[in-house]
Image (cartoon, rainbow, N blue to C red):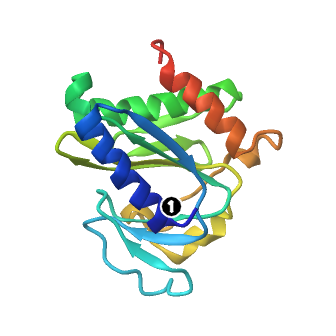
Amino acid sequence: MDFESAFQIQRNLWKAAKFKNQQSVMGLEHPAVITLGRRAELPINSLTLPVVRTTRGGLVTIHSEGQLVIYPIVNLRQIKVGVKKFVEYLLLVTQKTFEDFDIKTFIDDQRIGLYTNNGKIAFCGLEIKEGISQHGISINISNDLHLFQSIVSCGVQEMAMDRLSNYRFDVNLEIFFDAWIENWKSKDT
């Protein structure tokens, strides 16, 4: 689904979270697009891909085919969780899911995300509006990592990237998302 259509669905789900106390989680794949967070400048050398300014925090990233983007729309006030704890939970759920597929990752609190020894494998960028989350976490599954060379991802020059398909060929976006949702629901994560 294209990024703008997905964001419109998020807006509708945000309203449902606000007025109906409904919590939602979407797992999507986007056609290649550069997204700019609130603090990001337009990348000069990457004009071959569409560029979309977003309302999330963070700087520049790329979403593309083969990358799983998970959007939890959750009222943090209702579940009594702060933003920092929510980001930590998103990363821990993702880390646990990678563990389920025998892939070791670690969380970097300075450069928010999830990493393997070979590079960054998951990114987190949120917007919290009236206590309700939008945007979320993107996970490199089988996407073209060369696309990241056209940007300064998350403000880090020449950041090494990694993806799940470098370790496992039997796990696609749907399988990973199903496992992620099970960990999301689990109280042990």
Indicate whether 119 appears above or below 176. Answer: below
**Left of 26 or right of it: where is 87?**
left
Residue 26 position within the rendered picture, expressed as x and y whole percent measured from the top left: 51, 44
Residue at point 54%, 67% (across, down): 2
Indicate whether 166 appears above or below 171. Answer: below
On the question of residue 56 being in view, the answer is yes
Residue at point 79%, 40% (across, down): 168
The quadrant of the image that shows the N terminus is: bottom right
Indicate whether 49 appears above or below 12. Answer: below
**Left of 183 or right of it: where is 35?**
left
**Left of 56 or right of it: where is 9?**
right
Answer with the quarter of the image where residue 73 lies.
top left
| Mark 1: few/some/many CA within 10 Å (<14, 14-19, 20+) | some
Residue at point 56%, 29% (across, down): 181
Indicate whether 133 appears above or below 79. Answer: below
Residue 173 position within the rendered picture, expressed as x and y whole percent measured from the top left: 68, 45
